C-alpha cells in the first residue's frame, strides 16, 4: 500500500468507529445491557478495521468518458511533464509507525511486568485461578487466571469477600482478552480517538459486570460506600483489572439501576439498519473510485483549421461541435496559384487522319479530326478499325496497334491510364524520357518512352 491508500484506510476506519461509538452513546450507553454492550464495543473496533478492506459493488457510480473530443482537447492543450513517481513510504507514515511502535513496546512492558510480579511473590493454585499475595498499592487486581491479592485486605469480612467475587468475575468472564485486544488496537491505531473512547467504555462495562456479580441481591449501599473509600487511578495501557479502577459515579449508578429502559429491543436491533447503511455508503465510494473500464467510443469529426482556431464539426449535419484555440500553431501554407483553364474536351480518339477521296464518300465507326496540314513528330496512340464507303464500295482498314509509352505516377507504374481523369491542379511536374535516358532508368519497360507524372503532396 502506498501513502495515499494508507491514509485513506485510516480515514475510513476513523469514520466507521465514530459512527459505531456515536450509536452507542445515543442508544446503549448507561443501560443495563452489559453483555450486549460488551459484544457491541468489541465488534465496533473489529469492524472499523475490516470494513475498509471490502470491495463491494452493490451500487455503481461511473463517469461517462467522451473519448473523441476529450482526447483531442487533451492533445492540443497538454504540456509535456517529466514523470514524478510517488514515494511508497512518506515521512507521515514513518512518524505514525514510530509512535505506534512506542505504544506497543509500552504495552509489552506492562504485560512483562505483571509476569515479573507473579514470579517475585508467593503463588498458590486455587482451582480455576492462581492466588498471588502482594503488598502492591494497586492490588487487588486480576490478569487472565492470576489474582493478585493485597495482604492487608482480609477475606474474613464482608467487603473482602465482595472484592474477591468481583475479581473472580473478571477471571471467569475472560475480560483480560478484551482488554488486551482493545489496547493493541489503541497502540497500533493511536491516531484514531474513537478507539480510545471505546477502550475506556469497554473497561467500564467490565466493571459493571463484575460489580453486579459481586453484589448480587446484597447490600448495594455498603458496596457503593466501599468504592468511595478506595480509589486507584494509574491505568494507562494497563492490561490488568484493578478493583479500585473507577468511574466510581457510573459504577454506583449502574448498581442502583434495575429497570429496563424503554424500547429495549428496538435499541438493540437498530444496529442492523445502521450496519447496512455503512456497507452501502462504502460500496458506493469504492465503486466510484474504481469504475469498470468501458470501451472507448469512436467519434469522427470534420476538422477545419484556421490561423487562430481549429473547429470540429459533425460530418453528418455540418454543425459545429466545439473549437480549440490554436494561436501557437504555424499558419497554413498559402493557397496554390490558380491552374490554367483546361482545354476544351475533344474527341476521345487521338488518331489524327487526313484523307483525300475521289468522287466523295462517307466515314463511320470512328471519330476523325480533319487537319489542314501534317503535324511533324506526332504518333498515334491507338485507333479503332477504319471503315470507308466510296461510290458504294466499303473499305475496312485493320485496327492500328501502336506501342504505348510507359506511364509512371509518383514512382508507381500505371497501365491503361486515362490521362483525362487526372485533375491538372493536382500535378506538380511532368517529365518525358526518351531513348537512352528512358532505357537507363526503366530498362526494357521504357523502350517506347516514359511519361513521369509527379503529383502535389
Image (spheres, rainbow, N blue to C red):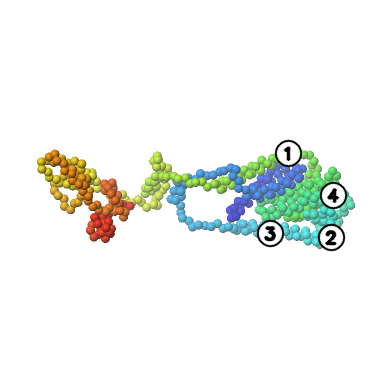
Helix, strand or loop for disc 4: helix
Residue picked out by circle 1: 265
- Residue 429 image position (x, y, % from top left): 27, 53
Kindly report which numbered mark, 2 or 3, lies closer to the viewer in this rendering.
2
Answer with mark 2 or mark 4, whichever residue precedes in sequence: 2
**Tags 2 and 1 in contact by the CB under 8 Å rule?**
no
**Tags 4 and 1 in contact by the CB under 8 Å rule?**
no
Residue pictured at 28% horizontal, 46% vertical: 421
- Residue 132 image position (x, y, % from top left): 83, 57
Kindly report which numbered mark, 1 or 3, lies closer to the viewer in this rendering.
1
- Residue 375 image position (x, y, % from top left): 16, 50
Answer with mark 2 or mark 3, whichever residue precedes in sequence: 3
CA separation in Å, label 1 and label 3: 43 Å
Around disc 4, counting alpha carbons within 10 Å, would you say few (fewer than 14), some (14 to 19), or many (20 or more)?
A: many
Residue 122, disc? 2
Residue 162, disc? 4
Amino acid at each position: 500500500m502506498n501513502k495515499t491508500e494508507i491514509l485513506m484506510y485510516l480515514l475510513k476506519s476513523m469514520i466507521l468507529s465514530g459512527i459505531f461509538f456515536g450509536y452507542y452513546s445515543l442508544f446503549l450507553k448507561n443501560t443495563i445491557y452489559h453483555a450486549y454492550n460488551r459484544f457491541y464495543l468489541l465488534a465496533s473496533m473489529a469492524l472499523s478495521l475490516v470494513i475498509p478492506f471490502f470491495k463491494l459493488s452493490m451500487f455503481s457510480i461511473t463517469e461517462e468518458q467522451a473519448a473523441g473530443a476529450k482526447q483531442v482537447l487533451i492533445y492540443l492543450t497538454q504540456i509535456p511533464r517529466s514523470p514524478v513517481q510517488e514515494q511508497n513510504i512518506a515521512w507521515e507514515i514513518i512518524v505514525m509507525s514510530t509512535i505506534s511502535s512506542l505504544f506497543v513496546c509500552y504495552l509489552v512492558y506492562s504485560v512483562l511486568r505483571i509476569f515479573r510480579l507473579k514470579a517475585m511473590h508467593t503463588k498458590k493454585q486455587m482451582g480455576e485461578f492462581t492466588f498471588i499475595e502482594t503488598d502492591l498499592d494497586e492490588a487487588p487486581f486480576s490478569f487472565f487466571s492470576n489474582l493478585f491479592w493485597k495482604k492487608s485486605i482480609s477475606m474474613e469480612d464482608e467487603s473482602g469477600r465482595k472484592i474477591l467475587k468481583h475479581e473472580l468475575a473478571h477471571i471467569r468472564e475472560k475480560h483480560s482478552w478484551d482488554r488486551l485486544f482493545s489496547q493493541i488496537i489503541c497502540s497500533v491505531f493511536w491516531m484514531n480517538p474513537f478507539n480510545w473512547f471505546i477502550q475506556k467504555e469497554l473497561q467500564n462495562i467490565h466493571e459493571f459486570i463484575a460489580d453486579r456479580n459481586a453484589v448480587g441481591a446484597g447490600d448495594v449501599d455498603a458496596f457503593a460506600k466501599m468504592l468511595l473509600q478506595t480509589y486507584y487511578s494509574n491505568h494507562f495501557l494497563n492490561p490488568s483489572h484493578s478493583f479500585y479502577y473507577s468511574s466510581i459515579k457510573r459504577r454506583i449508578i449502574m448498581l442502583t439501576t434495575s429497570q429496563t429502559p424503554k424500547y429495549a429491543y428496538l435499541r438493540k436491533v437498530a444496529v442492523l439498519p445502521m450496519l447496512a447503511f455503512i456497507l452501502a455508503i462504502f460500496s458506493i465510494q469504492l465503486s466510484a473510485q474504481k469504475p469498470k473500464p468501458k470501451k472507448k467510443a469512436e467519434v469522427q469529426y470534420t476538422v477545419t483549421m484556421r490561423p487562430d482556431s481549429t473547429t470540429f464539426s459533425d460530418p453528418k449535419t455540418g454543425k459545429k461541435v466545439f473549437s480549440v484555440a490554436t494561436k501557437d500553431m504555424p499558419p497554413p501554407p498559402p493557397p496554390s496559384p490558380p491552374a490554367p483553364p483546361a482545354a476544351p474536351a475533344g474527341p476521345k480518339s487521338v488518331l489524327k487522319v487526313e484523307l483525300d477521296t475521289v468522287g466523295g464518300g462517307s466515314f463511320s465507326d470512328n471519330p476523325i479530326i480533319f487537319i489542314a496540314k501534317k503535324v511533324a513528330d506526332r504518333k498515334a496512340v491507338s485507333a479503332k478499325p477504319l471503315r470507308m464507303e466510296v461510290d458504294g464500295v466499303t473499305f475496312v482498314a485493320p485496327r492500328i496497334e501502336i506501342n504505348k509509352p510507359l506511364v509512371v505516377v509518383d514512382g508507381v507504374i500505371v497501365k491503361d491510364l486515362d490521362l483525362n481523369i487526372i485533375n491538372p491542379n493536382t500535378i506538380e511536374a511532368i517529365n518525358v524520357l526518351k531513348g537512352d535516358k528512358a532505357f537507363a532508368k526503366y530498362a526494357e519497360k521504357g523502350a517506347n518512352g516514359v511519361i513521369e507524372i509527379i503529383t502535389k503532396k
